[in-house]
């Protein structure tokens, strides 16, 4: 049966854009991108809270084929990144491919035709040969159900749902959480609010950020001097890979990072009791290692208080902790992160023989092959799928490794002919995941703290247990023998030649 497009991409965040650029580079123009919002950018469009910025250095957090020479600072702010992504989409003529306000409800494989049907919120169906799921990982807000929340008289919201009209001047504000979002929000609102209570369940490990402006002269050098920008990119990349060794089990590296983090607390936090409270008691890297220059200084302010007792309930005018203290608040910010490891709320993907991905994953555990393809869901590729999360480096690097692999996968699907499909051999996927889970046991992520990498069954379903350079090597060449190739008219057969 005829398809409307060769390829359908779900999501116009960075992953979707990186995939679209790769398709264009390979002279494939028959693709459509479905985007539920009215603009590109994904998390960089959605997260607009005060201080929102990337905690990966700007020259590394860049799409390789569209590098930006004129980043304004070491760590780019959310508006600058969003502008960059819009510019890339515009310059590379991606916009004409995007169907905005198209919220995909179901992606279903038709066994009889070997193609996919993509259905949006209006019921409109688009038929494609290949699906690229670029739905992002950090967009299902996790809000704890706190007892008594319905009684709260003030306003409350999640960090990813920041309304630009919000004015916190002279307000009594509560921030729940001390993760990557919270430590950017806190210093950026502390000046304006009357009081700020930060509810900390477990303190993060925080390293120096050393944020600085990139001067006009430096920007000129990056623009004009051949190799200058790429040298900086490569240097930062190499440093991040070395730091990542701490997460992957290198004790000397984690010891060094802990010493730096401890020194930072001693230097930047005035109150000795507060210093104690801010010192993590779990392996560095078990939760995301954060970088900040202004979080600890903000906590020294007289209007800022760190509450470490567990939250008992929310009342009309604030939050009561287990010690019975009422922390008065009229604004409550949930900086409580996202649901990532569990498949709840994932777009409905129906594979071969009617199997449903979220149900299968809920039952058997979330897994894929190289974070990219999934057995039982042929002609479908995931960007930043299960266990592809990078240790301390740019997610864009991982996405680019995946699209390099994906182009080979797409070429093989095309070679299989009309309606032909490529499905990962389940044994290959199982072996890959056994090895992966085994290697993960040696990483800091699996060292016993609570984090968003581990699912309800205690499996790490999000992170790759190696360096991003190792992931790149692993995805450099697609082995056709890892796949079962089939044509709708024939029974699937394993392929032995490459
Ligand atoms: P997060 O790192 O998962 O942090 C959530 C925080 O909320 C944690 O401190 C957690 O405490 C706390 N929390 C959750 N439920 C709670 C409850 N019931 N009571 C008290 N505290 C509770 O979430 P996030 O800060 O939104 O960051 C998520 C991810 O987004 C990051 O890891 C990062 O990958 C990404 N991000 C990146 C940037 C960037 O600069 N590139 C910026 C923001 C976010 P526990 O630690 O005790 O669970």
Image (spheres, rainbow, N blue to C red):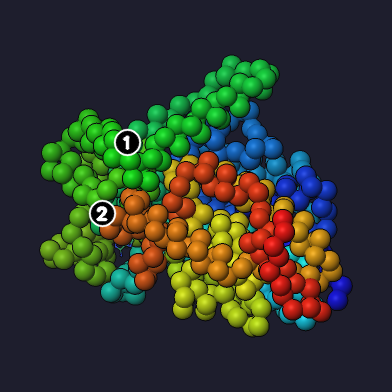
Which image quadrant for residue 297?
Answer: top left
Residue drawn where x is 67% and y is 73% of the image: 107
Label disc, if present, on residue 368 of the rendered structure: none
Left or right: residue 308 compared with residue 419: left
* Residue 209 position (above or below residue 119): above
Return the disc, 2 or 1, that comes first in the chain's sequence.
2
Residue 430 x, y percent position in the rendering = 51, 67
Ligand 1 within 8 Å of disc 2? The answer is yes
Residue 325 x, y percent position in the rendering = 15, 62
Q: How many marks?
A: 2
Can see residue 92? yes
Q: Which residue, given by chain and number where applicable, does mark 2 sit on? A: 202
* Residue 295 position (above or below residue 41): above
Residue drawn where x is 55% and y is 69% of the image: 427
Q: Splitting the image into four quadrants, where does ligand 1 fall? A: bottom left
Disc 2 secondary structure class = loop
Residue drawn where x is 72% and y is 52% of the image: 407
Residue 163 x, y percent position in the rendering = 50, 56
| Crowd tier of the residue under label 1, counting other residues whose Cα lies within 10 Å: few below 14, some 14–19, many 20 or above | some
Can see residue 116? no
Mark 2 near mark 1, Cβ–Cβ under 8 Å? no
Label disc, if present, on residue 253 of the rendered structure: 1
């Amino acid at each position: 049966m005829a398809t409307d497009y060769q390829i359908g991409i779900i999501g116009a965040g960075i992953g979707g854009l990186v995939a679209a650029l790769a398709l264009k580079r390979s002279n494939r123009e028959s693709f459509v991108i479905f985007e539920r919002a009215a603009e590109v950018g994904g998390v960089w469009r959605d997260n607009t809270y005060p201080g929102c910025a990337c905690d990966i250095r700007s020259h590394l957090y860049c799409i390789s084929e569209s590098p930006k020479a004129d980043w304004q600072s070491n760590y780019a702010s959310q508006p600058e990144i969003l502008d960059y992504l819009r510019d890339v989409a515009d310059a590379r003529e991606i916009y004409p491919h995007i169907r905005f306000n198209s919220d995909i409800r179901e992606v279903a494989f038709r066994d009889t035709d070997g193609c996919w049907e993509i259905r949006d919120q209006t019921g409109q169906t688009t038929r494609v040969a290949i699906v690229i799921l670029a739905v992002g990982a950090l967009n299902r807000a996790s809000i704890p159900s706190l007892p008594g929340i319905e009684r709260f008289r003030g306003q409350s919201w999640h960090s990813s749902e920041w309304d630009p009209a919000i004015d916190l001047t002279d307000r009594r504000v509560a921030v729940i959480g001390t993760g990557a979002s919270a430590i950017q929000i806190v210093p950026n609102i502390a000046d304006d609010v009357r009081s700020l209570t930060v509810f900390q369940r477990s303190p993060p490990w925080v390293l120096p950020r050393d944020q600085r402006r990139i001067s006009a002269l430096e920007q000129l050098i990056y623009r004009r001097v051949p190799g200058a920008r790429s040298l900086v990119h490569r240097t930062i990349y190499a440093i991040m890979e070395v730091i990542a060794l701490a997460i992957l089990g290198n004790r000397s590296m984690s010891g060094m990072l802990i010493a730096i983090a401890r020194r930072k607390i001693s230097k930047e936090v005035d109150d000795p009791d507060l210093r104690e409270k801010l010192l993590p008691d779990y392996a560095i890297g078990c939760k995301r290692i954060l970088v900040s220059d202004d979080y600890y200084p903000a906590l020294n302010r007289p209007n800022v208080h760190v509450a470490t007792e567990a939250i008992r309930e929310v009342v009309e005018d604030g939050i009561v902790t287990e010690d019975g203290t009422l922390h008065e608040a009229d604004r409550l910010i949930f900086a409580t992160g996202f649901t990532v490891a569990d498949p709840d709320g994932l777009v409905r993907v129906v594979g071969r023989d009617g199997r449903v991905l979220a149900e299968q994953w809920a039952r058997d555990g979330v897994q894929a092959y190289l974070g990219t393809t999934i057995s039982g869901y042929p002609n479908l590729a995931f960007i930043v799928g299960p266990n592809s999360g990078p240790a301390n480096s740019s997610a864009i690097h991982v996405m680019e490794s995946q699209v390099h692999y994906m182009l080979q996968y797409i070429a093989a699907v095309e070679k299989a002919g009309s309606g032909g499909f490529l499905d990962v051999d389940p044994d290959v996927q199982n072996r890959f995941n056994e090895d992966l889970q085994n290697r993960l046991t040696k990483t800091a992520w699996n060292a016993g703290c609570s984090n968003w990498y581990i699912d309800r069954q205690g499996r790490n379903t999000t992170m790759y247990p190696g360096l991003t350079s190792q992931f790149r090597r692993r995805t450099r060449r697609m082995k056709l023998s890892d796949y079962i190739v089939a044509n709708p008219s024939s029974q699937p057969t394993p392929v032995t030649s490459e």
